Image (cartoon, coloured by chain):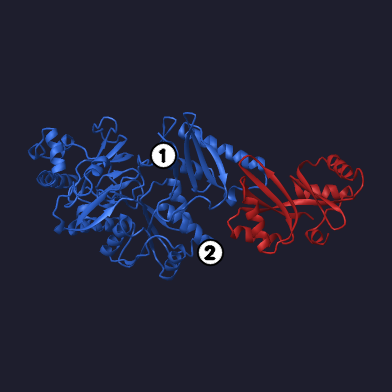
Chain colours: A blue, B red
Amino acid sequence: MDRYFQAEIECAPREKILEIQNSKLVAQVKNVWDNVEYYRKKMQEKNLTPDDIKSVEDLHKLPFLTKADLKEAYPYGLLARPLKDCVRIHSTSGTTGKRVIAFYTQNDIDMWNECCARAIVAAGGTNEDVCQVSYGYGLFTGGLGLDGGSHKVGCLTVPTSSGNTERQIMFIMDLQATILCCTPSYAAYLAESMHEMGLTPEQIPLKAGIFGAEAWSEEMRRDIEKSLGIKAYDIYGLTELSGPGVAFECSEQHGMHINEDHFIAEIIDPETGEVLPEGSQGELVFTSLDKEAFPLLRYRTRDICTLNREKCSCGRTHVRMAKPRGRSDDMLKIRGVNVFPSQIETVLLNNGYAANYQIIVDRVNHTDTFDVNVEMTPDMFTDNVGEIQTRKKILEDGLKSMLGIKAKVNLVAPKTITRSEGKAVRVIDKRKI
Amino acid sequence: MAVNQVSVFLENKPGTLDQMTEVLARNGINLRALSLADTNDFGIARMIVNDVYEATNVLKEENFVATFTPVLVYKVSDETGALNNILKIFSAANVNIEYMYSFIGKKAAYMIFRVKDTANAEKILAGKGLQSLTQEQIAEV
């Protein structure tokens, strides 16, 4: 039996959702036109006024916003409210060196927390649960986002933040935590550490995990579910739009429901910017309908995925997005071929290795070199050199068939690949281009 | 009786062997024999030690991948043709040797053999008069 945090809106008829989107969009475009000079100029360049946008049908006319716009307008250029109305900022981790700041009014935070609450309830959470939030607290949206959601649901919230693995495990065991929120790589690390302490999945009190903020594969999900004895749910979001909870998985674990009363999703051709027909794979674009302080219209996420409008058996009517194949920030172009770290992870797990790897790309004599360092595991080790080399060859062949280009696998000693307690360091790109 | 050898995965780069022997030294493990198999990027250290279980445990605690491998150990007397005589028995019994290495005990030399089907090979070789050493005997010699 599925439970909902806000059944009336989460299971609303499609016409109702469209009606909400139409009226909110018209108001939001007007709001942005009046308050954000940067975007008004972009509209004027296309000879648009708010009157041209009468419904979601007209959305495609509006100009895009990209990460480059956010950088150009940094820090206050896209702010739509006076500072006296703003109560908080968050900022992206800036892995690509482009730090982005997003602003929030109290209403923005409430809306965001409700989105996270929907995700927690969809994962089976109630006010009887003990919810440990092991995402980092601070500028990163993971910690405070799920923390707020957990409060709205009424869970006993354990704000451990990231790091200090021993203390994390102590709280999980002592308080009998039932829900764990963190990055999937940290969940895998916690599972590994708990097993090393001799804990079996049966002894671990957790029943559900809400994992996001980085790309992860179905194989990794199965691994984590098995090792912690839980159901693992994906959650999606961007700081630019609010944070985690823009979309979340339900009990079906088959795509993430986008909170369409707050966000309109489109799929576009990343090359031409054209809106693609339903079901196509392309770049995900979001328009935030309720954000007051930092209202982004047609923001290009760089995430490549598909949307699915089929009815979900969980009862929710909001569109589902597939797990993104990866952000273009993560996407590597190696010898002209697009490579997503999540693809490498899939091959590793399918071949019996753990998802502990690092991609090293360099350019030697105008040719890209592509190395994947993989940690040796007790399961994959044998005393026979030939057997290890055969297994390595099988892994290299698997990578070749998945990616279309050849990678050199290096077997490295266990726990030598940096496992940061937040996002995993998966890629080292040494190319100077 | 087959003897348990400790096999350890090592990266082929400076310092890894030293890290391993450091762990063993710190935990009072005595090495009786050591052999290294290497490839371009990794190697396997194979060791006969005084306490196999303790050695494997402390290595695992320090994040090494280590495993047991059964091997056969035979005494080789210090005279011309001694090894050849042993190997002749192996070939007569049609036992294939995956790898072998040696160590010198207090009084004699010993050869360590890794074969595919250890138990079966040991039985056949015993039938031909070759008595392999036990884990306890290794500690004494």
Give the spatial CA distance, label 2 vs label 1.
33 Å
Type of amino acid under label 1: Phe
Q: Secondary structure at mark 2?
A: loop
A8 with respect to A49 (left or right):
right
| Amino acid tagged 2 | Met
Left or right: A344, with A269 as reference point: right
Q: Is residue A1 visible?
A: no
| Disc on res. A340 | 1
Judged left or right of residue B10, residue B100 is right
The circle drawn on residue A197 is: 2
Which percent across, then down, holds residue B71?
75, 51
Horizontal and vertical percent position of residue B7: 68, 51
Up-down: is A157 above or below A327? below
Q: Secondary structure at mark 1?
A: loop
Quadrant for the N terminus of chain B, please: bottom right
Q: Earlier in the sequence, mark 2 or mark 1?
A: 2
Subunit bearing disc 1: A
**Outermost residue toward the right in this view:** B79
Q: Nearer the viewer, residue A59 or B50?
A: B50
